[in-house]
Amino acid sequence: MPQRKDYTNDAEHHGKFQVWLQAGSFQGKARDGAAERQQRVSAQYEKRVLGFDAWIQKQGYPSFCKPPFFEGWYTRIIAESKSFGVIFGHVFAGSAGDSGKGPLPTTYVALLRAADVGEPMEVHNCYPNGRNVTIGGQPVNSPPDVQGPPAFEWRSSAGAFIVTAEETSIDITCDGVRFVAELDGATPWSAGGYGPGGRLSQLPLPLHWFVYSLRSRVRRYVWSSTAGVSDEGVDAWAHQEKNHGKAFPSSWTWSQALDTTSGAALALSGGPLFEGLPPAYLVGYRHPAGSGIAIDFAPANGKLSAEVNGCDGSLRLVGTHPLTGHRLEANVTARPSELRRCLLGPTATGFAPVCVESYAANASVAVYQWGRRLVSSEITSAALEFGGDYICKQRNPCHAPSPTVPTQPMGNATAAAAIATAAT
């Protein structure tokens, strides 16, 4: 990340962070003309650094390109019936929020663990003071080589997350827990460097979702805590992704499933992105063993419908490609008892309690073409998340953040107090 001392204010500093991170952090290679297009997008973001308001008004750009803005990364590791999660991110809420004086913490790290199917999820939160992002181990003072391999590092007082083309290394300590993992290189969403949004990722939408790896082998992992809990293993699998944009929508659901035997993988996310319009979903399914199925659904290339019920823990999604005759049916379910821990997510002023998640869901997926079934999967230990208004109102462990939380410096203790206040 550009060093703070090199810039005149936090807005300029953070602007450079957004320019280079969106162009080349997790996203790796861009081929078949994508590099040129990405450079144009990066140039647009750089212009905004020079003067958000003036440039936006001149170009007619939408207002959601200005702060608030967030970046967040998520790695989930599946080790037979166990799962681990690593979440970290930052909300740029403007000068007050970015300096840590806003009502909620703006830098966030979480370690998650589900020791077995049916066991309650452990959630360990912490709020580091500051963070640093580099490309290739150097401060980000020039555009990254978007045609080259990924070389991304995120560091804070909580530890480090380092990505290269060959591996990802994780060493995070949070709330009395240390988690260390070593992952092999990524299985990308697509060979062209795009994620679930495809070319939509180049548009200034209020929210973007990028899947860096659908399936990476985990060489080893170690979870240890000051409470004496130790959990370690080898030969697990990982899913890696990121979000960036203005904020999460008012409602959303997300799911990720991986059959570690066949390699079948499902990833989906969606909700009402724009007020007054139907919910939009991005969906991808891969079945490399035998069938070689690789199919994506997005608003630009197909029709999607979803039935979401946070109270019974179910999500049913149907996607169709009218031109090719493909149809995907996905059903993901979790026991309501597994959706009782509230997780934090980005809001306009910082991280607040916004969603519930299970690591013990079941996913059933089938793909058809012109009425003939091509392939199907039954996947256990799937992840299923409900956020915002999709959380069951009858037993909602989260509450909307209060805009009247007192302004205070953000340390670990004060951040926890502010979040507790926001949840009341």
Image (cartoon, grey):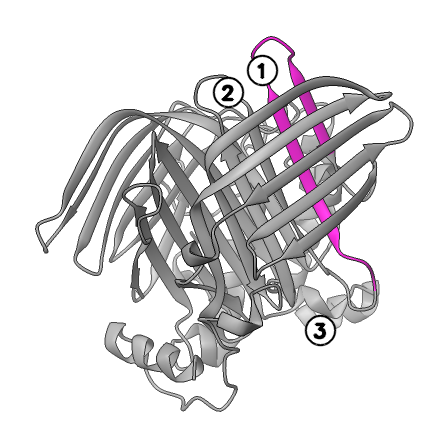
- Crowding at dot 1, Cα within 10 Å, few <14 / some 14-19 / many 20+, comes out as few
Question: In this rendering, is residue 289 above or below 132?
Answer: above
Measured as percent of width and height from the top left, residue 184 is found at 37, 23
Ranked by sequence position, the earlier of labels 2 and 1 is 2
Look at the magenta stretch and give its main secondary structure.
Answer: strand
Q: Secondary structure at mark 2?
A: loop
Name the residue nearer the viewer: 30 or 387.
387
Q: How crowded is the residue under tag 2: few (<14 C-alpha within 10 Å), some, or many (20+)?
A: some
State the residue position of label 1. 288
Q: Earlier in the sequence, mark 2 or mark 3?
A: 3
Query: For numbered disc 1, what is the local secondary structure?
Result: loop
* Amino acid type, callout 1: Pro
Q: Amino acid at mark 2?
A: Gly
Give the residue at x 68% y 45%.
Answer: 316
* Front residue (pair 34, 64): 64
Q: CA distance from mark 2 to mark 3?
A: 47 Å
291 drawn magenta:
yes
The structure residue drawn at horizontal position 34% and vertical position 56%, both measured from the top left corner, is 110
In which quadrant will I find the C terminus? Answer: bottom left
Q: How many marks?
A: 3
Question: Whole-Å distance between the Cαs marked 3 and 1?
Answer: 47 Å
Give yes or no for contact between labels 3 and 1 (Cβ–Cβ under 8 Å): no
Q: Is any atom of residue 170 visible in this view?
A: yes
Tell me if residue 78 is in the magenta stretch: no
Find the magenta span and give its range: 277-296
Asked which quadrant contains residue 198, the reply is top right
Front: mark 3 or 1: 1
Look at the numbered discs 2 and 1 and tell me whether their residues touch, using CB distance below 8 Å: yes
**Residue at left 87%, top 24%?**
325
